[in-house]
Amino acid sequence: MSETTPGDAAAEAASEDPATTGDEEERSDVVLEVENLRKEFGALVATDDATFDVERGTITGLIGPNGAGKSTIFNLISGFYEPDAGTVRLNGDDVTGIEPYKIANRGLIRTFQTPRKLEGMTVREAMLIGPQRQPGESFHKLFTAPGAVGERERVNMEDVERILEEFEIDHLARQPATDISGGQMKLVELARAMLAEPEILLLDEPVAGVNPTLANKLAEQIRRLHEQGTTFLLIEHDMKFIMSLADPIVVLDQGSVLMEGTPEEVRNDERVADAYLGGGGV
Amino acid sequence: MSTITDPRGYWGELTGEERGVAGFLIAAVLVLLGLMLTGVLDPTYFLFLFGLGGMFGLMSLGLNAQWGYTGLINFSVAAFFGLGAYGAAIMTASNSPIAGDMNPIFGLLLGLVLTAIVAVAIGIPTLRLRADYLAIASLGLAEVVRLVILNEGQWTAGSQGLRGIPQFFEGWPVLSTLPETLPQVNIEMIPGRVVTLGLPFWRQLLNVSLVLAFMVVAYLVLRRAHRSPWGRVLRTIRADEDLAKALGKNTYFFKMQSFVLGCLVMALAGVFFAHLQLFVNPGNLDPTNTFYVWVAVILGGAGSNRGALFGGFVVVAIREGPRFIDQLPPAFLTEFPPEFLRNLEFITGDILFELPSIAISPGPLQLLLVGLLIIGIMRFRPQGVLPPQRELIWPDAVDEGVRQGPDSGVREQRGGESDE
């Protein structure tokens, strides 16, 4: 999935993009477009007309002070919240407000801020949930086509072993998924998300609560996957981490996009420093 | 299979829990055999109890497929059991207002179809919501189904119940006459106490083979499903539904499948019950049965098919055991406390003096035992007696060596292979 050549994708995006504005025609290879997205919780406007794009082949960072609405935007994009206004487009298709699993099926996979524990599963079992469209997920095929189910399961198992090795956590394969550390869990989550072969991967604070060694390892993995062609959108509070990894960076403040630019521009922007209360965070 | 070809190797592969349960089962079988051979327990009656055990085992299997796999809280086990029983009865009973006197196969089909329709109908509004909504709705559903059956006499004969249900295999080519052809067997282990296995025994055996067949089929289907990617999605939903959604799984559809599948297994128990008791009435939809089934699943261990079956039988033993005390021949137990305890009176003085006047009736004792059992499990073994013991991966996909060998050594060995 992730190996779509840039040319194809560009043509696809261009052909399905007649409605977009002139600004977007210049850089038509956009995977994800967020336009005037709005979400209110009662009187609180969590997302206030946020607009930004994620171009194919980038690691786009999404930062902002606490309460800026980063996680809300993730939930809006991935379908967990329904927006009050605005649109989300994935490869040019309007996916606003459709079910999370349908968005995932279209190649957008997300992780969660707090790693989700899968009770009663080993790490490799937990990994095997990642692959999409498994024949074994259809109940009747378990009885009508057990061969195909087994064949796919074997392939998936090999993929799991390979990817765990790439992530250097293959020694955890048969550990209970609830017994590994928070940082290892984040690695497992990232590895599992890759099994879904996403076009774009949304990571919600991938290194929150992770020790520095593991954080470096995660950064390395994200870079490696990026080089292999996956597009990333990530939220992170760790400035060193995101500044070294992401380009461009989108800065959110109070639910709307404050600015967008390279790490250098973001670092030197006064508005950003103000948003972070005198620049303490930057 | 390996049980037969290599019993020692099979035993060596079992986990501690499995050995414990296996030992317990062997002991229970020996005790029951002893009781039957000495004439204390009537074999025909034992078969009836075994049938009840299988029935509860089936219901627990069904509930396990809902709660144990997917985390769906279903409080209308008794209602789906009742739908199965009434489906069977309406087609076959002699006083059925609608159909009646038909081949039990049609009853089985009607029971399953009714169940599936009701399960889908209750699932549509509730399964999109969080687990609690299904719990509440199913609690109400159980009452609705019972009241409908009680009051819609033009379909169900209301409170008088449906009578004259044939045995399931009646009218079948060979099976219906098989019991008559089997010889009468007399066993005399203790002189003067003859145990006779005659026509009633063979009839009951044939009847009970139905529940065995249901159990085997349900168990095999559920085991395969549990180990499959399908089952893995259900287990993910139980742990964290949002994660399953984020990974592209249509959780609503999976929950619906799991719910309907579980309800169908419960209905099988009902179908069997109708052909065991040969009479059904609205009282059979007693909601307490729902909670006995819950106890069975919790006892066995959530997510464990074998545990659910085990729990079903244990619950029946607890339910019927105290009742059985009354039926013991006078020589065994007439009063409480027994003679030898009362002889201790002089040691403890006044306290035991009062004891002979305590009346032990089976009803309260049964509830007391169930209560103690729940408290005991929750306190000492919240995961149940036999929680899932192994990784649940489609068997073809795991190398044989991995399944049999020890954990760590095998992984190293496999690592070595892939390096080359």
Image: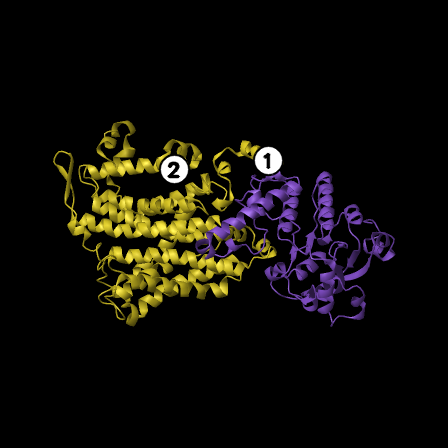
Along the line of sight, the residue nearer the viewer: A197 or B364: A197
> Residue under circle 2?
B2
Q: Count all numbered tags in the image, as a single digit.
A: 2
Display colour for chain B: yellow
Q: Quadrant of the C terminus of chain B?
A: top right
Q: Residue at x 36, y 35 (%)?
A: B5
Q: Where is residue A177 in the image (x, y as percent from the top left)?
A: 57, 43
Q: Is mark 1 on a helix, strand or loop?
A: helix
> Residue under circle 1?
B415
Q: From the viewer's perspective, tell me whether residue B28 is left or right of residue B247.
A: left
Earlier sequence position, callout 2 versus callout 1: 2
Judging by colour alone, the chain drawn in purple in this rendered image is A
Q: Quadrant of the N terminus of chain B?
A: top left
The span from disc 2 to disc 1 (Cα, nearest Å) is 28 Å
Q: Where is residue A127 in the image (x, y as percent from the top left)?
A: 58, 47
Q: From the viewer's perspective, tell me whether residue A93 is left or right of residue B293.
A: right
Along the line of sight, the residue nearer the viewer: B207 or A8: A8
Q: Vertical placement of B388 versus B349: above or below?
A: below
Task: Bin the neighbour count of mark 2 within 10 Å (Cα to Cα): few under 14, some 14-19, many 20 and up.
Answer: few
